[in-house]
Image: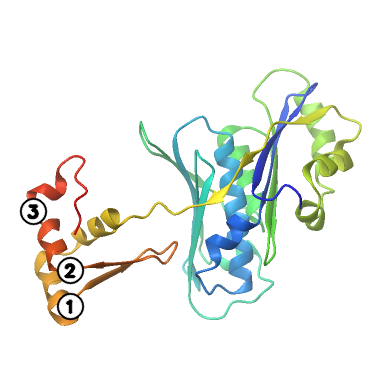
């Protein structure tokens, strides 16, 4: 996969159809390396990360896109985030042993999924994704078909080392899109996981659409990055009372907080506790954590 840790937009010059190709390798491995996830969770989180980056690539905003699936069985949470700088992170919560070959839908007992757009400026928006399909791609196709009325085809895959994704979508424009879509989507449906993971983007597009005029835009780089910080981790303690936190300090000597995404450990002492409940902790621009 020569296009690892890159995302590229695809445009069909004579058709009202667009596409996005993404390949993850180092970013995928870094997001998961501090977690002892079983094979099936690694695979599904890779698909979620590829999907989040593809969805974020089509939005004109500064902020983050969050793709989240929750269930009531052994897997309770699958989540991937991508921001406007193409920085990714992901997390899963589960109990017990999981079958390696379980499908996406099998992991989410009584499941529900949502796409959340969290801009730096403006209101937060959340769309509910129906779990209609066996795969993550099929569920997202149903979402765009119902909520946006845009025919969409999505293909995501991952193994222990790499993850990749391909999205095709009709542009919201008048023309021969319906007829063209039938032809292009049929060709894209022949794509195999091995091709998506192993072929470079130019070779893949030529193999699928050699009779069409399509071109790749300049690639954007993707990286793993967690935006946790000592200040932000300290602020999470405000969900507890000062008395509860003081009791932990008296018993343990420190209050330890671990980021669930990257496992970074933050340690807070008595001075941090006093700062947390002082007037200065809420002052704009204040970052004087002990």
Q: Is 118 in front, or is 223? A: 223
CA–CA distance between discs 1 and 2? 7 Å
Residue assigned mark 3: 278
The answer to whether residue 79 shows anywhere in this view is: no
**Res. 283 image quadrant:** top left
Q: How is the image coloured?
A: rainbow
Q: Position of residue 33 (x, y in %)?
A: 54, 68
Q: Position of residue 236 (x, y in %)?
A: 25, 58
Query: Which secondary structure, mark 3?
Result: loop
Residue 253: mark = 1
Q: Who comes first in sequence, dot 1 or dot 2?
A: 1
Q: Is 118 in front, or is 255? A: 255
Q: Nearer the viewer, mark 3 or mark 2?
A: 2
Residue found at x 85% / y 43%: 203
Query: Which secondary structure, mark 1?
Result: loop
Residue assigned mark 2: 269
Residue 279: mark = none
- Label 1: how many Cα within 10 Å (few below 14, some 14–19, many 20+): some
CA–CA distance between discs 3 and 2? 15 Å
Query: Which secondary structure, mark 2?
Result: loop
Q: Say which quadrant the C terminus sits in.
A: bottom left
CA–CA distance between discs 3 and 1? 20 Å
Position of 103 with respect to 223 (left or right) is: right
Residue found at x 65% / y 42%: 7
């Amino acid at each position: 996969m020569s296009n690892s840790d890159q995302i590229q937009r695809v445009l069909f010059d004579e058709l009202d159809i667009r596409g996005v190709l993404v390949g993850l390798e180092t970013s995928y491995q870094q997001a998961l390396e501090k977690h002892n996830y079983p094979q099936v969770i690694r695979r599904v989180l890779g698909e979620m990360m590829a999907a989040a980056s593809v969805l974020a690539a089509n939005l004109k905003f500064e902020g983050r896109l969050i793709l989240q699936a929750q269930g009531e069985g052994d897997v309770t949470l699958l989540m991937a985030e991508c921001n406007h700088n193409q920085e990714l992170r992901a997390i899963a919560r589960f109990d017990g042993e999981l079958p390696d070959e379980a499908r996406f839908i099998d992991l989410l007992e009584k499941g529900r999924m949502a796409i959340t757009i969290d801009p730096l400026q403006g209101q937060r928006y959340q769309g509910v994704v129906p779990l209609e399909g066996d795969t993550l791609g099929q569920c997202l196709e149903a979402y765009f078909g119902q909520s946006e009325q845009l025919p969409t085809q999505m293909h995501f895959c991952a193994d222990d080392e790499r993850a990749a994704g391909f999205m095709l979508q009709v542009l919201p424009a008048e023309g021969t899109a319906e007829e063209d879509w039938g032809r292009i989507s049929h060709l894209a449906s022949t794509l195999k996981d091995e091709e998506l993971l192993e072929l470079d983007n130019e070779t893949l597009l030529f193999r699928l659409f050699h009779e069409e005029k399509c071109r790749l835009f300049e690639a954007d780089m993707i990286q793993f990055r967690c935006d946790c910080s000592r200040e932000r981790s300290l602020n999470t303690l405000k969900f507890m009372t000062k008395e509860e936190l003081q009791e932990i300090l008296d018993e343990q000597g420190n209050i330890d907080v671990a980021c669930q995404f990257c496992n970074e450990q933050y340690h807070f002492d008595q001075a941090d506790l006093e700062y947390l409940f002082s007037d200065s902790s809420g002052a704009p621009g204040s970052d004087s954590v002990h």
